[in-house]
Image: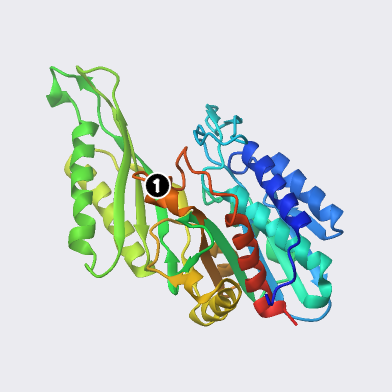
Amino acid sequence: MSPLPAIDSTLIDHMHQLYRELHAAPELSMQEHATAERLEGILDELDIEHFRSGGTGVVGILRNGEGPVIGFRADTDGLPIAEDTGVEYASTARGTLEDGTEVPVMHGCGHDTHIATAVTAVRVLAAQRDAWSGTLVIIFQPGEETAAGAKAMVEDGLWDKAPRPEVMYGQHVMPGLAGTITYSVGDAMSQADSWKVTLRGKGSHGSQPQDSIDPIVLGAHIITRLQGVVSREVDPRASAVVTVGTFHAGLKENIIPATAEFSLNVRTLDPEVRDTVLGAIRRIIVGEAAVSGAPEPIIEEISAFPRNYNDPEETEQVMAALRSELGEDAVTEVAPLMGSEDFGALAQAIEVPSVFWMFGGHSQDTLNAPDVPVNHSPFFAPEIEPTLTTGTRAALAAILSKLGK
């Protein structure tokens, strides 16, 4: 018999309906206004106290007598992607980026599954209070895709308004087999830093290069040198990735422009490696500009995703609970992922441990296909079941590993 409270068919039907509605109505990062209002309505319906945090973040506090305080996070934002899944509840939503560009919007990273499973877990706990005691702080966090949401909630006084948990939990749907869980001990996902770099040169006619400081040539030297950071300055046993994703300069082939702009993304697991890589990148950018006789470039941070570290002791306890609920073969330890999350910022702000795991969202047939739809793909559409029920059972198993009687 399952150690968890029952998830009856009515709750499952509600979860499926909520998921479809959320999937059809995604909102961009830090613009999740309708989603937040929908969540507030659900918490009101369940008579759970709640408050706004970080603009479009919603925090619910489910109290049930004496006991530990546990935090659980579900992220809520969508992505600027045109959906091409073919499901009947596909998104046709549009949104506007910060620069005013109108874009299609899709739940291309599965945050709709995170909301639906978290809401269902809360419904179960609210209805079956005799099975547990303590306090659950449920965090519906905006802006995960831009690393803005967790930071905004913390800066808005999240932990001054909500009870401080002794541990934070979170989960994420991935293109694994539905019904299964994967996790890592220690580093779970990479840190990620994105910069925009503006190179300042001196413009001139293409026939008079002697009068210029060419920012395109400068940029080419910088980008080439950056490829040596990982191969020559990082221990080969460590993990690091440096990617230059954009480069923009000039308007005409016979005009040397005065400026050039590129953006880069850095992925690392170890904080010391992160410092080494970022320091080397800054040194190369500034140094190459000096060698070229150019003014010092302008370096601006686009985003910074924090460390996502699974506390070994807490992870062991949670995974034992998940194995007990889902079966030994359903829960597997894997190497850290080089994708990134801002989940870790919530726990780091109050120096408590955290545990973050993945649940699969695809059938075996989908996984056997030549091109498996991955997160951030226009084709990413998790199988509704057993994905949602597994996510709910995993959330409940983790929470009740601390709060269960």
Q: How many marks?
A: 1
Question: Which residue is at 76% across, 64% downward?
Answer: 124
Report x, y in % for residue 353: 56, 75
Locate the N terminus and report the quarter of the image it occupies.
bottom right
For this view, does 241 lie left or right of residue 53? left
**Where 112 falls versus 350 (above or below)?**
above
Is residue 287 toward the left or the right of residue 59 in the image?
A: left
- Report the residue at 62% width, 41% height from top: 23
| Residue 301: image location, x then y, percent | 43, 48
Left or right of 207 in this view: 134:
right
Query: In the rendered image, which residue does mark 1 sit on?
Result: 372
Q: How is the image coloured?
A: rainbow
Query: Which image quadrant: the C terminus?
Result: bottom right
Q: Residues within 10 Å of mark 1 (few under 14, many from 20)?
A: some
**Residue 388 on image: x %, y %:** 62, 56
Task: Kindly identify the residue that appears in the image at 14 percent across and 24 percent down.
Answer: 209
Residue closer to the observer: 262 or 266:
266
Q: Quadrant of residue 370?
A: top left
Above or below — where is 268 with respect to 367?
A: below
Is residue 182 in sight in this rendering?
yes
| Element on which disc 1 rests | loop
* Kind of residue sitting beneath label 1: Val
Residue drawn at x 66%, y 42% is 20
Q: Is residue 152 visible?
A: no
Front position in the image: 327 or 85: 327
Which percent across, then down, holds residue 280?
Answer: 27, 57
232 left or right, relative to 330: left
